[in-house]
Amino acid sequence: MLVPVTAPTKARDPPLSLWPTNGGCKRGPSKPEISPPHRFRDNGIVSLDYVGGTVPALVSHRDRNLLPRPATVLQAMFSEQAAQSAESLLTSPSAAVSTFARVPVSTYTNCSQNFRLGERTFNRQYAHIYATRLIQMRPLLVERARRKWGSNITVKKLCELQVGEKCCVVGTLFKSMQLQPSILREISEEHNLPPQPPRTKYIHPSDELILEDELQRIKLEGAVQVDKLVTGTILAIYGSERDDGKFLVEDHCIADMPTQLPMMGPSTDRFVLLVSGLGLGGKSGESLLSMQLLVDLVTGQLGAEGEQGSAALISRVILAGNLLSQNTQSRDTMNKAKYLSKKTQAASVEAVKMLDEILLQLSMSVPVDVMPGEFDPTNYTLPQQPLHRCMFPLSGTYSTLQLVTNPYQANIDGVRFLGTSGQNVSDIFKYSSMSDYLEILEWTLRIGHLSPTAPDTLGCYPFYKTDPFIFTDCPHVYFCGNAPSFKSKVAKGEDGQKVLLVTLPDFSATQTACLINLRDLTCQPVNFCAFGANDEDGGAAMETGP
């Protein structure tokens, strides 16, 4: 069984007690005075019979018909556990009680102070953040340019250009796009145009790139990828100005990866579980079942002793945004008369209650970091501030629950993590020819900026002293949430940097999470798949990648 390593902050909330029963785990007699985390008295929760005992599921009676059949197949959590645990669920339980202590986090530091907002003032222009971004990144770009084109190259500002003279210029890109949505264009009386239909991508062959610095701007032509680059990118270009006033680019360079501190990871296996897009309130029975399987896996209530021993190696859980479904964002009540919506409760209220119950189960057993996302109840602009603790009256009493910002950066057992809930990557996807989220994620690391399209097409706070989205040091793990699918790769820099890139899929759609081993930064997906009533195998299964 798993034993929590941290106690609740309140004495009246004792930790969860577990013991194996027929190869599974069952809750012990130690109960807090509050309602158990799996008991939704108002919603009428049903229970599903799993191998090894009865495990309650976070599903109401109205969604019962949407559920697949109860789980009868459980696969190994880790690949190496598959062979030795294949028969464990079919054998009688051992006479000795097995206890698995949760592996503790030896060192942890939240490094997201740059993303916390103090005084919030929105009466400043956004030109300050572009000027600050250029001032901060120009020295790095000049250094990269001299390394690439030679130390004797001439670096000039746009106002110093001479026709036909080859030189290097550092500036901020602006991409003039014909299809870019514009509220001014839509409401213009002289055009009287209907609103543009939503598109997957807004790129067009007629798009142009313009480089600008503090004083001037100039159109670019030549060896530069117009369709790939986006507004807000700091770029160093080499070439010359032509007679027509345009700059002919012969080559260009980007900031590339910043310096990286050596990784001081643990010497033994220790895992961090990354999950994104729980999508609570989405009315999907399959995703709710998979979510309960995920919670049971982390808390040691799933599988036999082999799987429980492996689950004890999970030292931290990171929830990367979109905890609530987009369905909870319905604004129909705003368009109705007050007497029609007076007794109507927002869909997000029940979703937040369910989230509180899930976080209670997790935080009883393991430290949890909760990042907000696009559809979560916090500020819309980046950086998103932590969810308010008053929304979680049950789980908020535990010190193991940490509400963090988006983007989020932390040192976990000597490994630097940096990630977002996916808004920065999905926004670049719309305005660039890059279609692979993993490619976009690596590209943001190469250009040295988390979100170059902010504040042009992605909302952000009007910073004026510093740009917190600039990479000051290189992380060891760089992830984004709410991607279409799970992908990972190791990106390498010129100075020996190695970064594990991970795109986390929407859990409510794919039922897939990700495990990262802090010892060697290997990662694998964990899929909680559910079979329908007509499937041959039946039940639900938990699978892991290679």
Image (cartoon, rainbow, N blue to C red):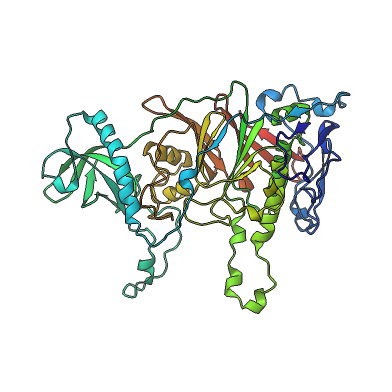
Residue 219 at x, y percent in the picture: 22, 50
How many numbered markers are drawn? 0
Is residue 489 depicted above or below 346 in this figure? above
Q: Is residue 194 left or right of residue 164?
A: right
Residue 111 at x, y percent in the picture: 50, 39
Residue 420 at x, y percent in the picture: 50, 44
Q: Front-most of 363 and 520?
A: 363
Q: Is residue 485 left or right of residue 440?
A: right
Q: Residue at x 76, y 25 (%)?
A: 86
Residue 530 at x, y percent in the picture: 71, 42
Q: Residue at x 38, y 33 (%)?
A: 258
Q: Front-most of 5 and 470?
A: 5
Residue at the far front in the pictured view: 11
Is residue 265 depicted above or below 180 in this figure? above
- Quadrant of the image containing the C terminus: top right
Q: Front-most of 504 and 295?
A: 295
Q: Quadrant of residue 162?
A: top left
